[in-house]
């Protein structure tokens, strides 16, 4: 039934245009993010000390990091299908998230923590995860962003907030991000959502 409602939404030509534009923006954002990741890897300098990572033993969380990311995408799709009209706003907000992250990653070039786990360099995730693209944590920020987008749905909101907390722990114990990458993600993501509410106001209002 949810899927049928989504399909029926495309009978509205205005919705179809907004939906296609949203995905075009996301595609551009992902390309920009990829280029920023390649650049950050190439120019990364030295690692730095971290009060948390220095005192927490590294744990192999490769599987959780990768497959948890895929599960997060599935959760976003399922949540979005519950309210098809919110789709364009969701996709555009995610696009803004990745463009913002690409900008931040291009500004400061710190090498990963020396004891970080190695993520499979041959998998699909290599297009999204780069050793030099650390600030800020996408695994922590994206589910928090979705919690903000679906704030009116308590069950979905709490689920995404739990996922955000779990990923925050995962990237820290895997030494995949510095602590500042993780904790700043909540503040930066909140700002991204506030900006999205303004520049994508019409999409947000149509999705309410």
Image (cartoon, rainbow, N blue to C red):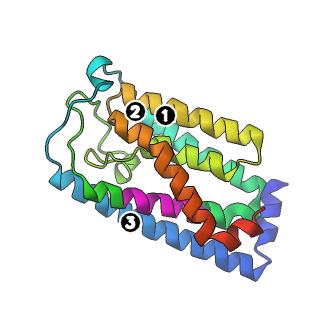
Query: Where's residue 64, x and y in %?
Result: 46, 31
The tag on residue 31 is: 3
Q: Quarter-wise, where is residue 110 in the image?
A: top left
> Can residue 107 be found in the magenta stretch?
no
**Image quadrant in which you'd find residue 86:** bottom right
Q: Quadrant of the N terminus?
A: bottom right
- Front residue of this view, candidates 165 and 42: 165
Q: Which element is circle 3 on? A: helix
Residue 119 x %, y %: 32, 37
Is the magenta region chiefly helix, strand or loop? helix
Q: CA distance from mark 3 to mark 1?
A: 24 Å
Magenta stretch? 91-102
Residue visible at 69% across and 41% down in the picture: 157
Residue where numbered disc 1 is placed: 167
* Secondary structure category for the residue under label 2: helix
Q: Is residue 178 above or below residue 34?
A: above
Specify few, some or many for label 3: CA neighbours under 10 Å numbering under 14, 14-19, or 20 or more: some
Alpha carbon separation for disc pair 3 and 2: 23 Å
> Is disc 1 surrounded by few (<14), some (14 to 19) or many (20+) residues within 10 Å?
many
**How would you rate the neighbour count of disc 2 (Cα within 10 Å): few for under 14, some for 14-19, many for 20 or more?**
many
Q: Mark 3 against mark 2, which lies toward the viewer?
A: 2
- Rounded to the nearest whole Å, what is the CA distance between mark 2 and mark 1? 6 Å
Q: Residue at x 37, y 25 (%)?
A: 173
């Amino acid at each position: 039934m949810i899927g049928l409602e989504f399909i029926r939404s495309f009978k509205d030509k205005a919705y179809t245009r907004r939906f296609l534009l949203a995905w075009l923006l996301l595609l551009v954002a992902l390309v920009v993010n990829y280029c920023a990741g390649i650049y950050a890897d190439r120019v990364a300098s030295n690692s730095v000390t971290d009060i948390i990572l220095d005192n927490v033993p590294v744990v192999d969380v490769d599987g959780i990091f990768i497959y948890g990311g895929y599960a997060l995408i599935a959760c976003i799709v399922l949540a979005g299908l519950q309210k098809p009209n919110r789709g364009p706003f969701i996709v555009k907000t995610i696009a803004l998230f990745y463009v913002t992250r690409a900008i931040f990653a291009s500004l400061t070039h710190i090498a990963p923590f020396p004891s970080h786990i190695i993520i499979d360099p041959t998998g699909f995730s290599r297009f999204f995860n780069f050793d030099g693209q650390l600030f800020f944590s996408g695994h922590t920020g994206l589910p928090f962003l979705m919690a903000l987008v679906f704030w009116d749905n308590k069950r979905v909101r709490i689920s995404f907030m739990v996922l955000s907390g779990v990923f925050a722990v995962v990237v820290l114990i895997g030494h995949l991000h510095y602590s500042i990458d993780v904790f700043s993600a909540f503040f930066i993501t909140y700002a991204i959502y506030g900006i999205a509410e303004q520049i994508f106001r019409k999409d947000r209002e149509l999705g309410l």
